[in-house]
Image: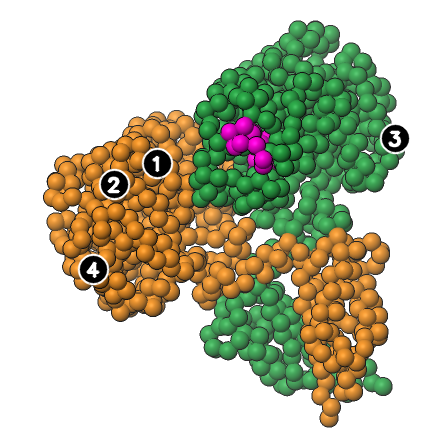
Chain colours: A orange, B green
Amino acid sequence: MSERLIYLPLGGAGEIGMNAYVYGYGQPGRERLILVDLGVTFGDMDSAPGIDLIMPDIRWLEDNRDRLDGIFITHGHEDHVGALGLLSGRLKAPVYTRRFTGALARMKLEEAGQPTDRLNIVEPYPHVVEAGPFRVQFVPVSHSIPESAALVIDTPAGRIVHSGDFKLDGTPVVGEAFDPVLWHKIAGEAPVAALMCDSTNVFSTHPGRSESALAQPLLEFVSAQKQLVVATTFASNVARLKTLADAGVAAGRQICLLGRAMRKMVTAAVETGILRDFPPVIGPEQAAELPRDKVMLIVTGSQGERRAASMQLSMGRYLGLHLHEGDSFLFSSRTIPGNERPVIRIMNNLSRMGVNVFDADSGFYHVSGHANRPDLEAIHDLLKPAVVIPMHGEHMHLREHANLARAKGLSAEVVTNGTMIDLAGGGVRVVDQIETGRIYLDGNVLIGAMDGVVRDRIRMALNGHVTVSVIVDENDEALPDAWVETMGLAAQGRAGVPLARHLESELGEFLERADHATVMNDKKLEDGLRRITRQVSMEEIGKKPEVKVIISRLAAD
Amino acid sequence: MSERLIYLPLGGAGEIGMNAYVYGYGQPGRERLILVDLGVTFGDMDSAPGIDLIMPDIRWLEDNRDRLDGIFITHGHEDHVGALGLLSGRLKAPVYTRRFTGALARMKLEEAGQPTDRLNIVEPYPHVVEAGPFRVQFVPVSHSIPESAALVIDTPAGRIVHSGDFKLDGTPVVGEAFDPVLWHKIAGEAPVAALMCDSTNVFSTHPGRSESALAQPLLEFVSAQKQLVVATTFASNVARLKTLADAGVAAGRQICLLGRAMRKMVTAAVETGILRDFPPVIGPEQAAELPRDKVMLIVTGSQGERRAASMQLSMGRYLGLHLHEGDSFLFSSRTIPGNERPVIRIMNNLSRMGVNVFDADSGFYHVSGHANRPDLEAIHDLLKPAVVIPMHGEHMHLREHANLARAKGLSAEVVTNGTMIDLAGGGVRVVDQIETGRIYLDGNVLIGAMDGVVRDRIRMALNGHVTVSVIVDENDEALPDAWVETMGLAAQGRAGVPLARHLESELGEFLERADHATVMNDKKLEDGLRRITRQVSMEEIGKKPEVKVIISRLAAD
């Protein structure tokens, strides 16, 4: 059998979030492996209530960890590094990142109580990291966080370019520009067997705009405001923080950063030398004492996160600061689909206070961090890969991206989570289908998405909950009293008496009638009690609740 | 005391949905009243899991129903007529609508088992409905449902124009055009004391476009597709259904309507004479047998509703029809904010099947039914009201609309749900603040939003649920066995044994230690058991669940 060059996405190919891509090279089933990125995504009330974080199920990789030669993190966004602390302990492989990403990765490991000695800070291209049969280079790209990198992965079966998250920004304000000269050089070094490529913005038809294009509009915006100015953006967008802060200072205001994530990010950027001339900042106490037209707050919570500064400010006082009629609040951000409700809630809260709200719809106050459709075409043209494998996208993004590549005569394949392909033969050959899925962090426990925990929560939220407790005495006779407690159900139904009392009386009748065989059989008794509870609830209030039955059997003395 | 002319929104002023606006005229506290619209809004998992419908709390109106002279329904959208069946029985007032709206109102009443004899079908302007001191005229306006009407409400204290939902469409395909000549006439008849005005699209800066502008692009779209074409839009947008169907027929396809709401709406439109030349339709069985390029499905579910045709088709077979690679699916609709997640889910499902998805982002396949910013300015100019009172909007829409009016020199006031104003003196005077809120239809029971039912459901969804059952025997001693059932919680925590068993053992220890006073006191015993359950759960799995405790006290023989 000949060597294979495999690609296996475990997360990120079929969703935007929780990226985790496996590459392997070697004899079938004995390939040496590397993992690119280990990210999280966030739950929502519709699909994962109560869940703190969602991660890719890496069981396959765990089962094969003796073959894993390294974990490479392209950049410091949560969807690329967020699961490192919680999951990398299961993999026990060395972790490679650039400096700034490494500072964030270190925090993740420390927060999870993991050792940090497997973390290796590496230099970018042309420095080479050797990991088993792979020679990996971090190539700087521009993105909405500093030091994002594409990976050039050389293998005995050819070169792979893994784009990471990127845009074509020649003037990114903070961090490295996208360098076409460098990329031309890379393209000329060796043919690209496959380009695994960011698909996020494939539906955006205009060329992406540079971060630097925001400086002038933001300065004009801040200068035009007459009272307190608040701006929110993604905490990790260090360049944006600087653009906003510079605009504030140029408009004669002092800058106050609100939100732990934002201060942490600026600290990491300063400490790693990424961010040099950030203006001095003041604390919230000082901000509260200055005239309102001399202060600009830059705050977290652009996606409507419940505990973040934006939502808190919109609901009243936060760290001694509160907004007034005539203040201005700018969303220097895009609302990620699915977050509309809480963001709109903030806007209405602010409206009630008389605060003037500005969003990025005009295009002047936000640019995306991802390559748009024409930018993707430019990268395809530049690298001329034998095949384009779209990643970092929902299915519709991957499919559109593949169609885009094909329209220009390139070969392209949609490969989604769990599909293992072999690239060694020149084309794309599906060689395996791995069981993948999601792991949830719930409180401090990791549970499987299919464990039924979340399904039960959703059912309780939709249907309410009834507890039924009955006692079977020492003589194996059911006591005719059933105790019922309801939660999340109307107190009273059609009978005009409390639902719980009505259920108790109906269940009591059932118990009195129940024959010995039913009473002696836990399953039968429980089924009967559940059936009546649901049936009576349906008649009374039109709902079939979730029912838990507790049968207590008293032991004979 | 002199007469007041009051305005009191009970719903719709501070949200888009569940419209209900009260007008009154007479001596303070003895005003004769009319109600305009009685609508619903829909719950979501974030804020109202398991709730079927949300309605305005009309208690104030119920308490004053002897003063209520009529209910006027402007048009047949759910957010204007949806609560008529469930709530109008409490008000016992005559209901006035135009013909098509009346057909829908009748269905609402019948579904709720209400008598329909209070329903009065009335002719439009210049016909006058007298209701107490009010003389009300229904004036046709264009909107995204046929026979929408503004109300001209004449009172002894002056004329009010209640815009209803409207747009300025001279060629609305189905139903009446917005007639500027008629509106000029109305504006000339009497000064307008107040304009209560639709605010939905105040943030849309371009002039609204006509429904008829879609015919050509839709024809071109359908003609260009090579396989089955599916189009979804709002069921009540009869004009759109016709535009879509006409495009399909012109492109050589037969039309099949899928979705109960859509067929109901077309039937009502045909029966009331609104819709004349709708093309003949075929059933799903016939559609399944025809060549795919000879069929066009027009289907419900443009907002991602779980049970509607769009979602069902995207998940597989629906009524014997299923989509194939190369089919085309068009959203001839806008995604209402908050519905993004399920709509995106449909798009990804379709992408997985290889179906080509088209949305309305291009602007060619959908137009809004509401007046945009310049259209609102045109109406202000035309009616020159003494004051503009924005309605039908979230707070940010109302505020923006008021600012828009003021910028043109008009007086304007934001009046939100529960605020009663008096317009009789010329200006706007706040005279009362009424307790308002929301009523939920939950199963077949109406409950108050503040009853705690939904709060408990959300808590169970976020925190999970534990049931604890203990028995106190005939001798007033707690049996040391506690029975525990969990739901929506990780099966196992740090102790490495099932959570329920671990809780039982910890609770058993507590029961053994508990003193007589605790055992004899339900409250004390319950508090102790709950506290330990939450504390142990926190240690074990990092979550504090909702806890129901059932204490069964065995009676001495």
Q: Secondary structure at mark 3?
A: loop
Q: Residues within 10 Å of mark 4 (few under 14, many from 20)?
A: few
Identify which amino acid the numbered label 1 is placed on: Asn
Whichever of callouts 1 and 4 sits on the residue coming sooner in the sequence is 4
Viewer-closest of A370 and B196: A370
Looking at numbered disc 4 in the image, what kind of residue is underneath it? Answer: Ser
Instruction: Specify which label sits upstream in the sequence, 4 or 2.
Output: 4
> Would you say B474 lies left or right of B44 here?
right
According to the picture, the residue beneath numbered tag 3 turns out to be B117
Chain that bears disc 1: A
Q: Position of residue A55 (x, y in %)?
A: 41, 58
The part of the chain drawn in magenta is B288-303
- The answer to whether tags 1 and 3 share a subunit is no
Q: From the image, tell me which residue sits under label 4.
A: A2
Task: Name the mark nearer the viewer: 2 or 1.
Answer: 1
| Number of the front mark, 3 or 4 | 4
**Callout 3 crowding tier (Cα within 10 Å): few <14, some 14–19, many ≥20:** few
Is residue B408 or residue B337 the one in the foreground? B337
- Residue A216, by quadrant, is top left
SS at mark 4 in the image: loop
Q: Residue at x 28, y 48 (%)?
A: A428
Q: Position of residue B506 (x, y in %)?
A: 57, 80
Disc 1 from disc 4: Cα separation: 31 Å
Give yes or no for residue B296 being in the magenta stretch. Answer: yes
State which chain disc 2 sits on: A
